[in-house]
Each structure stands twice: as C-alpha cells, then as structure tokens.
Amino acid sequence: MPHFEHGKVGLRWCDNCGTLILGPNCDICSSPGRYFEVSKPGDIRPCMGESNTVVASLFDRHFGTSEFLRNRTVFLNKVAGEDRTDEIVYQGTVIGVLRYDLRSCGFQLDLRLGGARMLYPIAKKGVVVMGRDTGHLKGKTIPGTMIKEIKGDFNPGDPLIVIAGSLVCSAVAKASSDEAPTAERAIGIRDVGKGALEVSKRRSSWTGFVNVNEKHFRSLESRAVSDIRSYAGNNKLPITLSFSGGKDSLACYGLASRAVDGLTLIFVNTGLEFPETVKYVRDFAKKNREQLLIADAGDAFWQQVGSFGPPAKDFRWCCKVCKLAPLTELIEKNFPDGTLTIEGNRAYESFARSNISFVEKNPFVPNQVILNPIREWRAVDVWGYIWWRNIEYNPLYEMDYERIGCYLCPSCLESEWRNTSKIHPDLHRDWEERLKAWSRKAGGGEEYIRYGFWRWKIFPRKMRQLADEVRLRLPEVRADRLDLKWVKGVSPCLTGGYSAEGVLSVPRKRDFSMVAEALKTVGQVKYSNDYEIALVKTKDSTLKVFGGGQLVATGPTPEKAHAMFEAGAKALLRAQLCTECGICVRNCRAKAIRLDRGLLVNEDRCNQCGRCAQACVVAHYYDKLVS
C-alpha cells in the first residue's frame, strides 16, 4: 500500500528498451533494469495525448528544444502542490517538475539536476556560463559579475542551466537576461552535478512498454480475477460493475468480464458529466453488448446549490445528492435483495483510500457490498492493463485530463478547469458566472473565484499563503458557513447536571412543524407550532429548540449535554436543508421515515438509532456547514 509521507520510492528503467519496468525483469531483454527514485507515493502514470504537448511546449519555451522527447515513453508522477504538480520522468530520471501556477494561470517548469545534465549539450537557450568554478554552489544565489556568457533570453522565475567549469547546475533566474549581468542577485542555484547524461537515441512506444511488462499485467489480472471469482462464488448476490467512464472502472471491467458471467454495468449520471463521458459509456455498453443501468440525478445539483452553496474539496455535498441518492434508488428498485458491486477504488488515489480492503460495505447504501480488485494498482498498472487488453477508453484522457468526473467538481485541478473552458466554453462560462454571483452575494470578489478559493470550506495553509501573495483578505472560513454563537458553553446547571446554550443561524425554508418532525429522531417531542418551540426528552437529557435557532440542552454530564445540543442542531438543519434525496429513508431499518416536502417521522416506529442522521448529507457535513 502507498505511503503518503515525504520521501522517495524506487522504480526501475530498462535502458535497452527505453521504458519503465513494472515486473521483476524486462520481458524483452530480461534486464532487471536500472534503479531510480521518484517522490512518494509514486502513483506514476503515462504522459499521453495533450499532456505530451504541454510538457514539450515548456522545454521549447525555456530551452529551445523538445525533440529529445519525441518517440519516447515519458511518465508523470503526481506530487504535492497548490494545483497540478507532476514530476517528469524521462529515461529513468526525473528531469523536471511540471507545475500549474494559480497566479499566472499557466504552466511552469522547474528544472531538476538530471534535466540540466541531459539538456545542456543540446539546449539552444536558457544556458548561463560562469567564469569559473567557485566551489560550493548548491543553494547559493550568484551575482551577475560572475556571469561570462548567456545563451538566449529569460525572465525572472524561469528555469536555467548553469555551467561552472566542470559543474552542471539546475537553477532559476532571479533577474531577466538583460538585467542579470549587473544584478546583485542574478541566479539561484538549486542543485549541482558533474558531466552530461547521454540523451538516449533508443526510440520507444506505449506498445513497447506493454510488451516489456506483459507478464506483469498477466499476473495482475490473474490475481484480481481469482479474488473476484472466489468471493462471488460464495455469494449469491447479482454482480454489478460501477462504470463511471474513467480508467479505473474500465480496468475493472476488463477483470470482471473475465471473472463472472451476467455482469450489469451501473452508471450514475450526476447531471454534471462531460458530454463525452455520457456518450462513451452508452457506446461502450452497446459495443460490448453489456446491460447498462443508469441512475439519473437529473437537475438535483442545480436545485440544491442555492441552499448549500458551491461544493468544496472538504464539503462534497453533491456526491450524496447527485450520486448516492439516485444510486440507492436504482439498487433498491433493481436489486431489492442487494448486489455485489465491483468498483475501481485505488489506495494510491488519496490518503482517505489508502487503507481500503478488498471487501467493503457501502455505509450509505445498505444493500450494496463493494469489491475493490485494483486497490493496490498504480495508475501506470491501470493504463498498461487497458492497453494490453486493447480496451477502448474515454477520449477525454487524450485531452490532458488526469481524472474523469463531474466537469465542475471542486476536486478537479484548476488546470483541467482551463481545459474545460476550451472544449466546453458554454459549461465553463455558466459555472464561472454562477460562482461570481455567489461570491458577490457572500461578500467576496472575482479574485476569490479566479484563484480557486471557492474550492474549500476551511482554507488549507497553501491557500492562505497564496492569499497573502496576491493580497487577498480571506475570512477565517468560507463566507457561506452558518454561524453558531454560544450563549453559554457546556457549564454546570443550577438545577443540577450540565447545560449547553447557543443560537444557530439557520435558513427558514420550511414550517416549524418540520423541525419538530426531525427532532423525533432525537427523542420524544412536544411542540407548539404557533410559538415555534419544541421540547425533546430522552432517558437522561432534555432539549429546547426555538424557531429562531436558539437551542438549550441539559444532561447529566458535560459530554451528554454537548451531544444533545449537537443532535438538536443537526435535526434543525436537516429539517430546513433537507434535499429529499431519500437516503435516510433507505437506511431506516424501522421503516419510520417517509418524505413529503421534507422529513416525516413515525414516532411509534422510530427508536432514535441515529442511522438516518449518519446517512444524511446535512448531518454528515455539520462541521463544514456550521462555523
């Protein structure tokens, strides 16, 4: 499994065949390969389609050549950064880092030492020659008086190759080429080495990459197919495949189609899918003669975005409303006894998925068991397997998209969002205008949207640093969060026990009687709709809720008083922000919940187990909705 801490991970490169080795040896020449390292977690992937154009353009811009990349297998390795940040792997060496800069809204290149040593004999620009070798240079900033020769023009921040006697350095310009000779701080030296690295004349291709690693792909398939057959053979549930139109679910199709008979594809159309993806999924199912079921969310996103605001990386309410709700309904209708679903979840995708197991239960879809046959695969394994099996993939991957999902997803890269503006300017323009209108209403400006701050509810350090650089004042949290003010925190109560009192600013979208309905999932309720007050009692705690958002909870311990307060606040929010997605209905084992313009609860059946709140998008994101 991957490790998401700083450090390096080892890989091997076949110099004879000019490509990456994934198995124990090269299948063509039997070479064990040359060891090299990339940054963790090492989810390396092929550089393909328009990604090649992006990389080549950077080397052309800064060094006047990209010919060395032609007809070669180049790989990208995602690393931490503000937005898209990829190590560029060429000839088993990290030659640079591709970085999307949010300030300039464009790609930048950071040159690594391996790249400098390869390029300096062939570079037509971006080379600076120093008059002498001054000894220790790494990490130093040199003045212009030490410059002997400059080849080509450059601007501050551009990558450079510096030659100092027998030393070759990767560097960055601190001044322009015109100003550098007289600048006190002209060039920053990053790393230093000796001699040139030969640029291979060996041509390579993705077909060659597959041939070099065929045994590896065969082994991956054999293990995964065996795992699927073993579990499915002992389980009588019908088999389904979650088919998103992305590469991971496509690889799972290749495995599942060899492991089981009677496979059904399930596609969740969120209403926010790329048109290319919808067409691809339909065409794929038809060409391969597979049954396709579509869970369609319709315009659910646009109905709810006014209530919740734009989704964020740490507030993906849209996934429950647009994915889980229609999926739950589809499974309940077509597979009332449940289904065994094969999914393309991979541990390398994120820290949250780093510990996934082969068999998982879907916590939000009670009658769905998940199998994760490619959980330990890297992106390069997925692509190699797809090419080996010659399976047709989504054409968007050739357009410099790393992942395929909803076109306006906050988790997509800003660089990919720029791609969307080119291929679907109408979709891009509509969402940008909606974001700007929302930002103005929330007291922000267009810079808030331009730099992507809308993508977070609570801003991480990297975004706060960016805000400082562009002189943008950020609120402590995103402006559309609801405010919770403590009148009295958890404190001793004069009548015994403890109390917690506060006021929650909450939108008034439904009658107070609907608040009382939601409170029935907390305890026994008495309420007055005219006076907008509800009294909730459990075995040892009480709660008062007022229509204006005031809450007073009491309990025998500080923990129980706080828990009662939070349960009441969540119920209040659930009542007013209910999306009527129906997930709570399907998660209620007592069959105590129904929907009729909001949540309705049968007191005689409800046992206050809390499963409905655990499944609710509003309650799930309580800490993101409430400040």
Image (cartoon, rainbow, N blue to C red):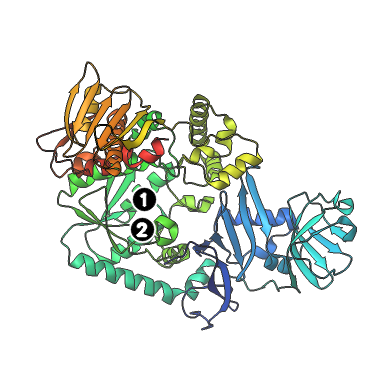
Residue at far left of view: 604
In the image, 130 versus 377, the foreground residue is 130
Residue picked out by circle 2: 344
The residue under label 1 is which amino acid type? Ser
Q: Earlier in the sequence, mark 2 or mark 1?
A: 1
Q: Position of residue 36 (x, y in %)?
A: 58, 73
In the image, 616 versus 604, the foreground residue is 604
Q: Is residue 303 left or right of residue 211?
A: left
Rendered residue at 29%/44% (across/down): 559
Residue picked out by circle 1: 244
Up-down: is 292 above or below 546? below
Task: Point out the frontmost of discs 2 and 1.
Answer: 2
Residue contact at pointers 2 and 1, CB within 8 angstroms: yes
Rendered residue at 49%/27% (across/down): 442
The reply to whether residue 326 is in sight is: no
The reply to whether residue 260 is in sight is: yes
Q: State the CA–CA distance, disc 2 to disc 1.
A: 9 Å
Rendered residue at 79%/56% (across/down): 187
Residue at far top of view: 530
Q: Residues within 10 Å of mark 2 (few under 14, many from 20)?
A: many
The residue under label 2 is which amino acid type? Gly
